[in-house]
Each structure stands twice: as structure tokens, then as C-alpha cells.
Amino acid sequence: MTRPRSRLAARFALTGVALSWTVGLWSAGQSATRPAVFVAEVDALIQPASAAYIEQTLNRADAAGAAAVILVLRTPGGLVDSTRDINTSVLEAQTPVVVYVGPSGARAASAGFLITIAADVAAMAPGTHIGAAHPVSGTGEAMDDAASEKAASDVAAYARSLATQRGRNVELAELAVTESQSFTEVEALEAEPPLIDLVATDLDALVAALDGRRVTRWDGRAQVLATAGAPIERIEMDWRQRLLSAIAHPQIAVLLFSLGTLGLTIELWNPGAVLPGVAGGLCLLLAFFAFQILPVNYVGLLLVLFGLVLLVLEMVTATFGVLAAGGVISMLLGLAMVVDSPAPELQLGWPYILSTMLALALIVGFLARLGLRAQRRRPVTGTAGMLNESGEVLDTVGPDAGGRISTHGEIWSAVASAPIAPGTRVKVVAIDGMTLTVAPLHPVVSGSEGDQV
């Protein structure tokens, strides 16, 4: 009786194993075919590199048939043109786009606010805020003249258009532009109608909350999101986009400008060095790319430039540190005001300013030391280069009859205050036209048969 029972148990075990394998293979097949959720993270100024990165991500998601694209957004603002390019890509994308302002403590200000309200689904993490979208000029000051008011009105109309299209609060969207108002995640969600769609503690909670959510696309087409269990595919910036994003940082931009100006100055001071000129020109071009994005105060920029000029002049003139002191003061004032923005992410900060000044001071001091050493070096060319040169007498040299000596790789006519025999080592003490005045290189010792060396 035990054998049939053991055989029956073995059959049940084999059946269970087969079912487990079947379920596992089916689950693996389902995971492999389930559309992925693409995640792209923007933690920088909104500028051409950011726009290209987001557009690239949306194109890849459309080509792969992704379930959704989540843009994790943290930004103090950026260029209006790049913002419009991003929103155009978001509105025309075949894949639903979710903008998530997070994690806790992050914000999406200015350009980030316009991108948030343009998304199919706008979400925020606890402790975040959006808004303050009033346009600013290239000097960092709020625009208040007639032309600037037109620009602000244009951006306000753009915000109203986006809010209307997405069914968000039009009045609050306009106030974020015209009055620079900001809103916490609670204020944005509890407004009537709301500015955002949901609050999620993290990315996993957001993906879970999106599952089964019905969104209306830009063309009026309704779509239900299916994100439960979907694989997450993170899209990173390529090296070019990372480089351009890094350059757009205020600290990098100011450093590039300083090094570029210094490099070109060294090239003009010492023509033919090549490397300082090439490196300086490249640094300046990259700095100008960053300055078109940043709210630059051009008075501060001119103070930095003036300070650099004074430091360079200190290297070529004897002012006993007066120009250097003026240059340091000018650069300190310029660096303190070159980027005029209330955003902490855009401020240079005194630790950076002082460390930059120390580095530039070391560079200028090193170059000044090389210049002084070159000025003190004994001449090696021309008539001045012949003084104190040593040589050998070829024909007897005396006060009346000039002889010849070999020195500096050449043969010269020479005279001396006392006769000097051939083969004697001498040095040049004076030059008169093409005749050298020489003296014995070693003291003369008197003997019974005349003077000998």
C-alpha cells in the first residue's frame, strides 16, 4: 500500500513543479512585453541642452511604445525659448507625460512652472513648491518697462493657454507670472480647479498612483495609464548634454570667463605662445554660452574684467602692488554681483568667490615672478650681451696696438690697459663700436722677465 501512495505523491510534486515553471515563464513573458515607464531627471537650468534631452527622451518613448514618461523636475528656471520647445515636445508626444516635482524640498520655479502645468499629469512631492514665473531680463532684474511688460503679458497668456488646455486653474497660472506667486503642493492640489493632479511621496508611489488613471491628450483622445508592474527605464543625458548643462552653472561660467580673459591677455603679452590664446578663446566662448542663459549683471561682469586687467598690468609695471590691490577689490565686487538672482542655486557664495580669488592671485603671482626673473636676467644678445663674456687672446693685445681675441664664438679686435700675451684668458669689460676692451680673467703675477699670467 505504501508504493502507490509514494507514486501518487511524486506525481503531485512533479505537477506542482511544472505549474510553477509555467507560471514563472508566463510572468517573465508578461514582464518582457509590458510597456516600460521611462524616467528622465532634470536638475539644472532650463536651456537648450535640457530641451534636447527631454525631446530625445520623448522620441525614444514614442518609438518604444512606453506606458508613460515621468520627468522628475528640479529647476530654478531658465530660457523662455527652451521652455516653449520642451512644452511643444510634451504636447505633441504620443506617450503620456507626467511631470513630478520632487523629492521633498525641491521646486520648479519660473520655466519649471510652465513645464509642470503643460504635462498630462502634474505631480508634486510633499514639501515642494512651484510658481514665481515672472520673466526677467538678461541682467537679472525684473522687467518693468514697456517692452518688458509686453514680454510678461506674452508669458502670462502662454500660461493661461496651457492651463486651459489641461483643465488647470487659469487664474493661479496667470498670477504665477504677473505677480510672481508660488504655491506649495497642498495649495496647488486644493485650489479649485487644482493646479496639479496628485501628490506622491516618491517615484514608486507615483507609479502606483498613475495606474488606471484616465488622461485626456492634447488632441482630445482619452487614454488610461497602465503602470502597475511596468519596468522602469531611466534615460540619462549623453556626454554633450551633461557638458552643456554643467557649463550653464554660474560658478563654472564665471571661472571660464576669468580663465579665458587671462589666457588671451597672456597670449597678447607673449605672442606666439599659442596654447594660452587657444585655451582662452575656448573658455570665453563657453562662458558666453552660459551667460546667455544666466541672469547676468553686466556691471558685475565689467568689474571682473577690469579687475583682471589691473592684475595683468601689475605684472608688467612697477606699481608696488597698487594695481594688484585695485584688481582684487574690483574682482571681489564684480563676483559678488555678477549673477543677480534670489535663487540659491544661482548665487556664487563667498567661499567660491574667495577661493577663486586665491587661485587667480596664485596664477598672477607666478606669472609676475616669471616676468621679473626675465627682466633681471643678463642680456644674451646684442652688444650688451658681450659684457663680461670670457675669451682667449689670439694676437698680443695692448693699449696701443690692437690685437685679436676669440669670444662668443666670434673673432673681435681688442685693446687692453696693459699688454696681454696670446693664449691668455680674458673677459670683456667695455665695448667701443667694433672694438672690445678686455682685462685678464685672473690676476697678473710680476716676474723677473716681465709680466706673466
Image: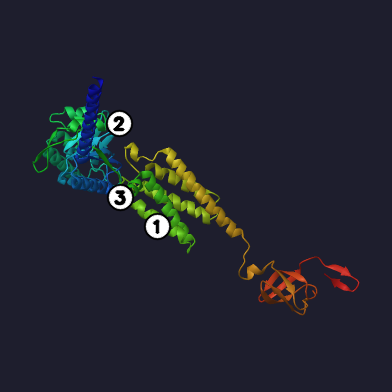
- In which quadrant of the rendered view does residue 390 lie? bottom right
Q: Is residue 356 left or right of residue 226?
A: right
Residue at 90% x, 74% y: name it.
449
- Name the quadrant of the C terminus: bottom right
Q: Mark 2 = which residue?
A: 105
When the figure is inspected, residue 230 is found, relative to residue 288, above or below; the finding is above
The 10 Å Cα crowd at callout 3, few under 14, some 14 to 19, many 20 or more, is few
Element type at mark 2 = loop
Q: Mark 3 = which residue?
A: 292
Residue 46 drawn at (x, y percent): 27, 44
Q: Is residue 367 in view? A: yes
Element type at mark 1 = helix
Cβ atoms at labels 3 and 1 below 8 Å apart: no
Q: Nearer the viewer, mark 3 or mark 2?
A: 2
Q: Amino acid at mark 3?
A: Gln
Q: Amino acid at mark 1?
A: Gly
Q: Mark 1 = which residue?
A: 281
Q: Residue furthest front?
A: 1
Query: What whole-number distance in Å separates the C-alpha atoms at marks 3 and 2?
Result: 28 Å
Q: Is residue 219 left or right of residue 116?
A: left
Q: Is residue 87 left or right of residue 416?
A: left
Q: Amino acid at mark 2?
A: Gly
Cβ atoms at labels 1 and 2 below 8 Å apart: no
